Amino acid sequence: MANLHLRVIALVALLAVSGALQAQYPSKAITLVVPFGAASDADLAGRNLAEHAAKFLGNHPIVVVNQPGASGAIGTLAVRNAPADGYTLLLARIASQVILPATDAKTPYQWSDFTLLSVLEVNPYVCVVKADAPYKSMKDLVDDIAKHPGKLNFATVGAGTIQSFGPQYLFSLVGLPKDAAVGIPYKGSGELTTALLGGQIQFVCSNLGALLPHLKSGTLRALMTTTREHLKELPDVPTVRALGWPAMEKLHAWSALAGPPLLPQEVVERWTDALAKLARDADWLAGNEKLGGRPAIRSPAETETFVREQYQLYEQLALRIGLRSR
């Protein structure tokens, strides 16, 4: 009986120590893995988070570590396999978190293999043409595509990317075949923009951030945005809802904060509190605006719903264009 009492006392003490440790989270630096290279959109979003969230976590540093490779799979998988203690977290991006597993059955993880803490920000998605193009509206462009199937080109950074999925989703909504216009792959947003300005392609649908300087300078013209409200940077550009395609509001790039599966509830609650404060932080908000993002902090449950719906959207689009078999 005495031995039993000793074991009970030891167990209670162990639980008390464990609880105390969790209550003190974080007690050291947190590693934030960005699964893309330095100066990428993901990297910039991660560094904006790291710089401004630390003050709501006892000023413990958040160290950004870039682990690029395999379209984001290397860094993402590293976090999934990390200890579930809250000290290794992931800057999840649409490309690595949902598009990759939706399009490639060999992806070594699923979108749901993580503790999803919050969406951080969304990036407006716009369709643009060269300023001297004959298309004054999105209807002009769609009508020309319909009249001359296969003639017009648009830029992508690969078949399984948001730059490709945007036009494909539009084609499906307006009843055009998947090859109504031809996607031409480029290595990145810089080459994509150069090709449009040079006349090698006729239109681009992509994140606002990389295109905004050219829209402001007048060398490019925006025809639509997928945001619910008009963008203050482009107040005269119609939304997809105004054009009759509200389903396209689902199309936008985004970043989220995630951790390994089964993060302790205490860690989840600590981050939920910190992110609620971050959502009102002027410095973080200013950083988002500079990067072309829109703040989108939400609860873990809301984040899980959001990411699930995003995965389902791109899975269906991948089936439509033959990137994934049923």
Image (cartoon, rainbow, N blue to C red):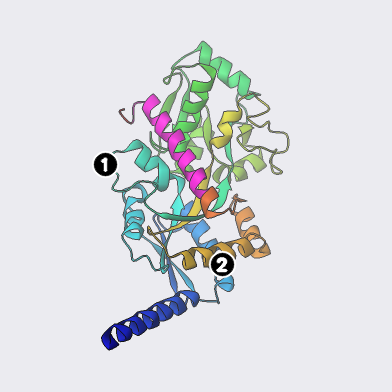
Instruction: Based on the picture, tell me whether residue 12 belongs to the magenta stretch.
Output: no
Is residue 203 depicted above or below 273 in this figure?
above
What residue do we see at 59% from left, 54% from top?
Answer: 297
Q: Where is mark 1, residue-wise? A: 106
What residue do we see at 45% from left, 49% from top?
Answer: 93
Residue range corresponding to the magenta coloring: 303-323
What residue do we see at 62% from left, 61% from top?
Answer: 276
What residue do we see at 46% from left, 45% from top?
Answer: 94
Dividing the picture into quadrants, the one containing residue 210 is top right
Dividing the picture into quadrants, the one containing residue 103 is top left
Q: Quadrant of the N terminus?
A: bottom left
Most common secondary structure along the magenta stretch: helix
Q: Position of residue 306 (x, y in %)?
A: 52, 44
Q: 300 or 12, which is in the foreground?
A: 12
What residue occupies the far bottom of the structure in this picture?
2
Q: Quadrant of the C terminus?
A: top left
* Left or right placement of residue 186 versus residue 130 in this view: left
Residue 134 visible at all: no
Q: Amino acid at mark 2?
A: Ala
Count of labels shown? 2
Residue 53 image label = 2
Q: Amino acid at mark 1?
A: Lys
Q: 326 or 284, which is in the foreground?
A: 326
